[in-house]
Image (cartoon, rainbow, N blue to C red):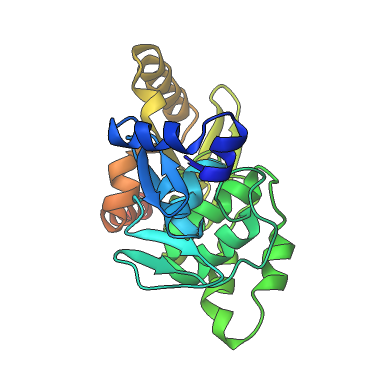
Amino acid sequence: MARAAQLRQAGFGRPAIANAVSMGLALKLSRGVYSLPSLNQLGEAMAHGGLLTCVSAAPFYELWTLDEARGLHLCRSHPGPAAKVVEHGRPQHPRHGWLPVAGLADVLLHSLRCLPELESLVMVQSAVGRRDIELDFLYAKAQGRRNGTARSVLDLVIPRADSLLEVLANTHFRRAGLRVRRHVFIPGVGEVDFLIEECLVVETDGSTHFAPKSVKKDQRRNNSSVLGGYLVLRYYYDDVVHTPDVMVAEVLRVLKLRREGKFH
């Protein structure tokens, strides 16, 4: 997508632009704004005179997300009536270098104030984990009574999470009152995602673990964990994201069985 002035600077005069629109080679999104026929959210942002932000901007910063954007999340200096647009006010920080996208700071702060807790958490975790932004900076920008929910989400960010499954599982386990250690090295096994109550290994596996070689490696790691005296449970995306209550209940059940001497 481009503005008419940019197209003219590239050598396309008014007749050429009008001809492209009439032939269906380009779309006129709004006055002075054009795009290729495959309209995307970037073109929609330009057409509405705003910058993509919140979850709509997540793909452009390669942030983790749980769900696709519901509506078009924009920050605009002059909001106007528009269907399915979620307004986030004026941008407060430097924008993206060349795309109609808000700066990372605005994107994350908007997500903290707009999205459900876990949806904003994974976005913030991915940016903080890559050191694209400092957690202290976000805390400083989330002061005051109206930002209490945002600060509670920031409290859930952990120093390292190799996947969104880890940060979500860690949140659920800790809220269940479990004693959790992450990224624990076990001799003969390697690094495990979680060691709960010093006896139960819990692994959270994404799609990369479905390759045949990975499946065999994981099963051998399970065997080594059991030979080392540990219990093992393994969970996948659907378990952690869609049925976390079932996952936590199973963990608690295994720990209860152990206390009752079932595994002695």
Q: Is residue 185 above or below residue 42?
A: above
Q: Is residue 41 above or below residue 138?
A: above
Q: Is the C terminus in the top left, top right, bottom left or bottom right quadrant?
A: top left
In this view of the protein, which residue sits in the foreground, 73 or 244?
73
Q: Residue furthest bottom?
A: 145
Q: How many marks?
A: 0
In this view of the protein, which residue sits in the foreground, 106 or 12?
12
> Does residue 93 appear to the left or right of 250 in the view shown?
right
**x, y (%) of residue 7?**
54, 36
Could you tell me which residue is drawn at 34 percent across and 51 percent down?
67
Using the rendered image of the protein, determine whether residue 171 is visible from the camera's viewpoint: no
**x, y (%) of residue 36?**
38, 34
**x, y (%) of residue 21?**
34, 37
Could you tell me which residue is drawn at 46 percent across and 29 percent down?
225
Using the rendered image of the protein, determine whether residue 106 is visible from the camera's viewpoint: yes
Q: Residue furthest top?
A: 213
In this view of the protein, which residue sits in the foreground, 229 or 96?
96
Could you tell me which residue is drawn at 56 percent across and 80 percent down?
148
Could you tell me which residue is drawn at 52 percent across and 45 percent down?
3
**x, y (%) of residue 114?**
45, 69
In this view of the protein, which residue sits in the foreground, 1 or 162?
1
Q: Residue furthest front?
A: 15
